[in-house]
Amino acid sequence: MSQYRIIWISLTILLLVGAIAWYRLSPKEIEVIVAPVERGAVEKVVANTRAGTLKACRQAHLSPAIGGQLNILAVKKGDKVEQGQLLLELWNKDLLAEKQLAASEARTARAQAESARVQAGSSNREAKRLQRLMQIAAISEETLDKAKTLAEAEELTYQAALATAETSDASMAVITAQLERTRLLAPFAGIIAEIHGELNEYVTPSPPGIATLPAIELLDTSCFYVTAPIDEVDAAKVKVDARARVTMDAFADQHFTARVRRVAPYVLDLEKQARTVEVEVEFTDLKEGQNLLAGYSADVEIILEERSNTLRIPTQALLPGNKLYVYQPKTGRLEERTIRPGLSNWDKTEILEGLQPGEQVVLSIDQPGLKDGIQARVSPEQSTKK
């Protein structure tokens, strides 16, 4: 074999080895997911740190004011009741008997008072008649004095009878109040959520410091609100009447408009949990027919600031240091770029400098091999969706 042939073969082998090495070591094309730079609204929001709770406007845990045997249970679980409607009544026949007795005594006292009034009136007229006769010396002064004394005594008897009648009425009022304590009435219109007790069972009200189950739980479902905890750091930014948005797992991606109605004036310090402040938001445009149930878990976003028709990108595209990658369709390469952001939330970020409308930013920032200048192509799945 000639020397030139050996050199040519050696060069060819070296070229092949170099080509293989270059192919293995050179950056390979990667697949990326992109999103366009567009105009739209961007909000600065504060969100709850733990799941909030949907609550009825009013919720009452009701029990009779006194203990006793449950004699009448006028409702059942799930019933709709009106304000003032009887819910339950304890055994109270003894009080009813006392009320009848008191009513009878009150009638007697009023009759006696009326009799005393008539008698006092008669004695007073007689004293006046004798006074006229005394002026013409038709009677003695002693007779007139006796008539006046009798009139005064009859008047005092009448006043005593009136006092007795008032006492009887007061006794009647006391027994009536005791009877009312055996009856439990609905303080507002609502739905019976729970009943803890059966007929003939003994109902005991909760003594101070000892929690016992209420006899009836009543919910006012004519309106709802949400309570949610927010981090203490964000509490100072939240103001009453601030716009808010509520989402619930039970309604998938549906959003409900709301407003902040209360910010708690204290911080909750619960064991093994971050310190939070409770916020209440009420719905502002709740449509009829929404099947809301008290107790649903809910998430709240409170809107602190908003920019409309501003340049924005998905927050997912941002890297530490306000860096991101821009896909260049003409060259098929990625360009690392530093931007200046404005308002931002977990979904969208406002762009003040560094990007133009229509440019495409890379969302798949965890893609291996991602770097400036690398060859890339848009994911076929994303292209198909478009």
Image (tube, grey):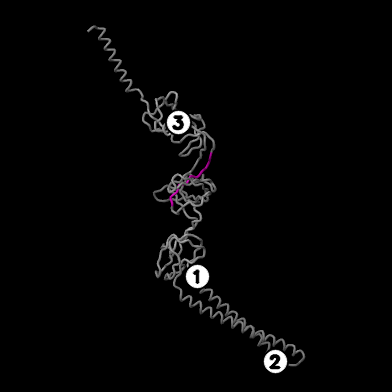
Image quarter of the C terminus = top left
- Residue marked by disc 1: 180
Give residue 376's position: percent from left, percent from top. 40, 27
Using the numbered discs, state the Cα–Cα distance from disc 3 to disc 1 in whole angstroms: 72 Å
User: Which type of secondary structure does the marked residue at label 2 adopt?
Assistant: helix
Using the numbered discs, state the Cα–Cα distance from disc 3 to disc 2 in whole angstroms: 121 Å
Q: Amino acid at mark 2?
A: Thr
- Residue marked by disc 2: 143
Image quarter of the N terminus = top left
Residue at horizontal 76 percent and vertical 89 percent from the top = 135
Residue at horizontal 54 percent and vertical 81 percent from the top = 105
Counting residues from the start of the chain, the first of labels 3 and 1 encountered is: 1
Dot label at residue 361: 3
| View extreme (right): residue | 136
Q: Choose top left, top right, bottom left or bottom right for residue 119.
A: bottom right
Q: How many marks?
A: 3
| Disc number lying in front (2 or 1) | 1
Give residue 134's position: percent from left, percent from top. 74, 90
Query: Which residue range is magenta in the image?
Result: 296-306
Give residue 141's position: percent from left, percent from top. 72, 91
Q: Amino acid at mark 1?
A: Glu
